[in-house]
Image (cartoon, helix red, strand yellow):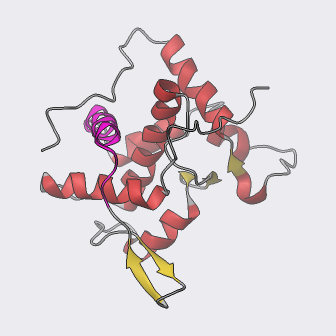
Amino acid sequence: MVSDVRPSSVHQPYDARTVTNFIIHYHRQRNEEITQLRLYKLLYFCHGWYLVERGVPLVWNNFEAWQNGPVIKVVRDCFASFKEQPIVGFASMFDLRTDRAVELPHHLLREDELFVAGVVEAYRKYSSEQLSLITHTLNSPWDEVWKSRQPTGRFGLRIRNDEILIDFKNIVDNTDCDYHIGDNSDSIP
């Protein structure tokens, strides 16, 4: 078994809510709506491709196997009230010092904004339901954790980064497509 991928000293993974805020901002700049389901899938794909391309996690939060696919709980907590409606607003976190919710930024390092925008563009042609089918593929990390008949011993049905990395590397190994999808330099102002 491959050990969990650890961040390098150069890259510090982001809070997933910051990356989701960038994805929401990216959609708004294009006058496009985004729902929870689509947001969760895009975040998962960005994280998986980042593991392949950069060898380190994009976000430090753990993905969990939920009924509708891989989810990061703190992200879901921010947007659960929207249900199937388009998301309005950005993710926030509770600041213990000020005793109030504070909106998280939507900016990443420029190279990471380009990467995430490239992944979002690569999956633009797929509906949210199609994206869901991709994450529900037989033997995918979500499938292995969600449908396991054996106790996994994982808190919150976590999907480990090494499992995500192997799955995305298998996509590269089993397709003829160019997987370098994280370069979208002409789509970010």
Which of the image's four quarters has the N terminus?
top right
Q: Quadrant of residue 105?
A: bottom left
Q: Nearer the viewer, residue 44 or 9?
A: 9
Magenta stretch: includes residue 120: yes
Q: Is residue 167 left or right of residue 178?
A: right
Q: Quadrant of residue 8?
A: top right
* Residue 51 versus residue 83 in the image, above or below: above
* Residue 170 versus residue 17 in the image, above or below: above
* Residue 90 versus residue 71 in the image, above or below: below
Residues rendered magenta in the picture: 106-125
* Main SS category, magenta section: helix
Q: Is residue 29 left or right of residue 114?
A: left
Q: Position of residue 12 (x, y in %)?
A: 52, 46
Q: Position of residue 52 (x, y in %)?
A: 51, 26
Magenta stretch: includes residue 113: yes
Residue at 59% from the left image edge and 39% from the top image edge: 7
